[in-house]
Image (cartoon, rainbow, N blue to C red):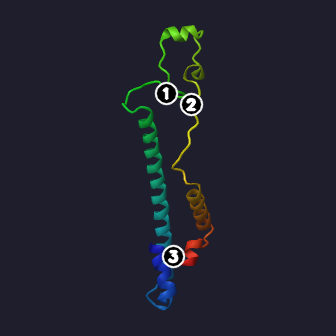
């Protein structure tokens, strides 16, 4: 929003013509605002990652107790390990997890975010910014 405000001041309010409009200070402010935006995006990505991991764990262990989960965990006793010739290869016990489909994944939104990030990295206006 700060960057957008600076652009409006420069384009619509002719702020560049003012003696009080310091180009160096504005450039520093614009860079600082962009750095804060990038940091906020990274923090939100971390929050989303940890939230997804917590969801994943609570789905598999809803009671908070260790239990058999195909492809992940298998509780075995020494007799079963002995029956498998003392082999501790995980695949022998846990099997293969069923393939997961993320119903919440929005391909178009992910592609749009990648495009916006790419455009910003090249200091270009996004399609939405061009229309605004």
Residue 29 is situated, as x and y percent measured from the top left of the image, at 46, 73
- Dot 1: what SS? loop
Q: Which one is in front, 125 or 73?
A: 73
Residue 44 is situated, as x and y percent measured from the top left of the image, at 45, 55
Asked whether the residues under the numbered discs 2 and 1 touch, taking CB atoms below 8 Å apart as contact, a structural biologist would say yes
Q: Is residue 76 visible?
A: yes
Q: Residue at x 55, y 20 (%)?
A: 93
Q: Mark 1 Cα within 10 Å, few/some/many (few <14, many 20+)?
A: some
Mark 2 and mark 1: span between their CA atoms? 8 Å
Residue 75 is situated, as x and y percent measured from the top left of the image, at 47, 19
Mark 1 and mark 3: span between their CA atoms? 54 Å
- Dot 2: what SS? loop
Q: Residue at x 52, y 86 (%)?
A: 11
| Count of numbered circles on the image | 3
Q: Residue at x 63, y 68 (%)?
A: 122
Mark 3 vs mark 2: which is more N-terminal? Answer: 3
Residue corresponding to mark 2: 97
Residue corresponding to mark 1: 69
Residue 113 is situated, as x and y percent measured from the top left of the image, at 56, 60
- In this rendering, which labeled residue sits more in front, label 3 or label 2? 2
Residue corresponding to mark 3: 27
């Amino acid at each position: 929003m700060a960057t957008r405000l600076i652009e409006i001041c420069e384009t619509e309010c002719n702020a560049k013509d003012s003696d009080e409009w310091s180009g160096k200070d504005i450039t520093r402010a614009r860079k600082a605002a962009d750095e804060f935006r990038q940091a906020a995006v990274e923090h939100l990505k971390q929050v989303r990652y940890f939230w997804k991991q917590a969801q994943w764990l609570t789905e598999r262990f809803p009671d908070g107790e260790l239990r058999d989960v195909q492809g992940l965990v298998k509780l075995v006793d020494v007799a079963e390990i002995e029956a498998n010739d003392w082999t501790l290869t995980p695949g022998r016990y846990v099997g293969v997890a069923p393939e997961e489909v993320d119903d919440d994944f929005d391909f178009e939104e992910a592609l749009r975010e990648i495009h916006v990030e790419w455009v910003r990295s090249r200091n270009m206006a996004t399609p939405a910014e061009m229309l605004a």
